[in-house]
Image: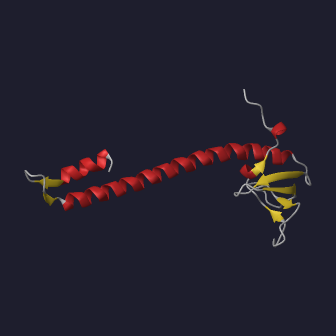
Amino acid sequence: MNKYAQSIVDSLIQKNEEGYITSMDFDTLNETVSQLVKARKEIREQNAAIIKARKDAENAVKAEAGKAYYDALPVGGEFQYKLSDGSIMEATKIETKSKTGLTAACELVNPPEDAKTSVRYPKFWQVVVPAEDTPAED
């Protein structure tokens, strides 16, 4: 048992002169456990929010570069995008009727056998920008 847990246990038990435990404050023990579980939940939620914010910021930077690269491609130009499992898909840029331009409209070069359609709309942060098209850092 670590020293913090031991100090909590020691504060909750009553011993007689010979060292035998005579009573234990279970109400305080239950309240302490409840507070620890609540604190653990809050810490996990805070950490998840921090990780999500960090990932969203990284994706925003990637999306900016991906959109610039995609917009520079001619219709029919080939590019790659990365799936969540890390696999790379090859696609060609297609015309779209959408005026929002929130995704990279494309058609897969080698669609999976079980695909209903080969048209895809990956997010710009998924677009793989070749190293020569990446802006140099100062």
In the image, 66 versus 37, the foreground residue is 37
**Residue in the image at 67% along x and 46% along y:** 60
Q: Residue furthest left?
A: 17
In the image, 83 versus 138, the foreground residue is 83
Q: Residue furthest front?
A: 18
In the image, 137 versus 103, the foreground residue is 137
- Classify residue 124 as left or right of residue 40: right
Tell me, what colour scheme is on the image? secondary structure
Residue 122, given in percent of the width and then of the height, sits at 75, 57
**Residue in the image at 21% along x and 57% along y:** 28
Q: How many marks?
A: 0
Q: Quadrant of the C terminus?
A: top right
Q: Examine the rendered structure and indicate whether residue 82 appears above or below residue 119.
A: above
- Classify residue 7 as left or right of residue 113: left
Residue 81, given in percent of the width and then of the height, sits at 78, 53
Residue 29: quadrant of the picture = bottom left
**Residue in the image at 51% along x and 52% along y:** 48
Residue 67, given in percent of the width and then of the height, sits at 77, 47
**Residue in the image at 17% along x and 55% along y:** 13
Residue 84, given in percent of the width and then of the height, sits at 69, 57
- Classify residue 39 as left or right of residue 109: left
Q: Examine the rendered structure and indicate whether residue 118 appears above or below residue 64.
A: below
